[in-house]
Each structure stands twice: as structure tokens, then as C-alpha cells.
Amino acid sequence: MSESARTPSVLFVCVRNGGKSQMAAALMRLHAGDAVEVHSAGTEPGSKINGLSAEAVAEVGADMSGEAPTALDPELMRRVDRVVVLGAEAAGEIGDDDEVTAVDVWRTDEPSDRGIEGLERMRLVRDDIDRRVRALIAELVDSEAHQ
């Protein structure tokens, strides 16, 4: 594979790596397929995937059922083209590293602040993340195509 045809890579990070970052990774894999190398991790990984998150992404054809929370690997963080941190909590735990190319912080919709809970909450979170993932795919794939 030539350098100009290199696959862009992204790492999605949240605190527990059981919900939002896993949702983003599943949606990225769904929409981008092999066009983007996808990873997810947590700053303080939990012990399991959030069942409602998995159910919400499954409704749109994405799959995170085979995933498990993973600890953030500083080497992976330096290697990927883009690090996307989901939520202000995790953003505060990502240190300044001159070797990390690009870090975006997505302050995602939090429906529980409006009293919306359960699967309805997860659907709104999913839809917010999905919009952002689609825009990121366009940016990553388009920028790679023009290099």
C-alpha cells in the first residue's frame, strides 16, 4: 500500500469505555467500514459494556456486542491520526502530549440533564454521536484522498 493510500485512524476515548466511546467506535465501523482504522479506550475502564448503549446502536445496525472496556494506551494515542474524547470528564484526564497529533473533545448531548433516562436517553446520545461520526468520516477520508 502506498503512503498516499494509508488508512486514517481514530481513537475514541471516554472514562469507562463502556458506553459513548464504544458507541462512537461501533458507528464509525458501521459507516466507514475499512476506510478508517477504529479504536476505543477508557481513562478508567469499567468492567463491561453498557447494555443500553449496545441496544441503541444495534437498532441502527452497529454492533458493539463483542467489545470490552480497554485501558487507554499512550502509544496508541500517539500513533493514531485523531483522538476523539467524548465528554468533559475524560477530557480532563487526557494530559498534554506533544506527540499526539490531534485531539477533539466532543461534549455530547446529555439527555439525563433534561430528565430523559433509559433507552430513550441512549437513542438521543447515539444520534448525537452518529452525526459527529459521519462528519468525522467525511473529514478523515476526504483529507486522506487529497494528500
Image (cartoon, grey):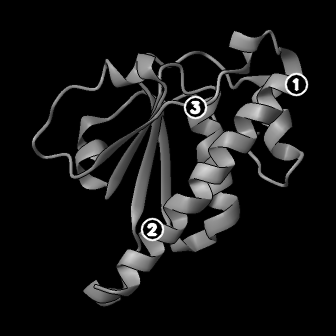
Q: Is residue 64 left or right of residue 21?
A: right
Give the quadrant of the C terminus. bottom left
* Residue ID at (60%, 44%): 24
Q: Is residue 102 visible?
A: yes
**In the rendered image, which residue does mark 2 sit on?**
139
Query: What's the mark number on residue 29?
Result: none
Nearest to N terminus: mark 2 or mark 1: 1
* Residue ID at (64%, 29%): 109
SS for tag 1? helix
Query: What's the mark number on residue 108?
Result: 3
The image shows residue 106, relative to residue 69, as above or below, that is below
Q: How packed is label 3: few (under 14 Cα within 10 Å), some, or many (20 or more)?
A: some
**In the rendered image, which residue does mark 1 sit on?**
119
- State yes or no: discs 3 and 2 in contact (Cβ < 8 Å): no
SS for tag 3? loop
Measured Cα–Cα span from mark 3 to mark 2: 19 Å
**Residue most toward the left?**
98
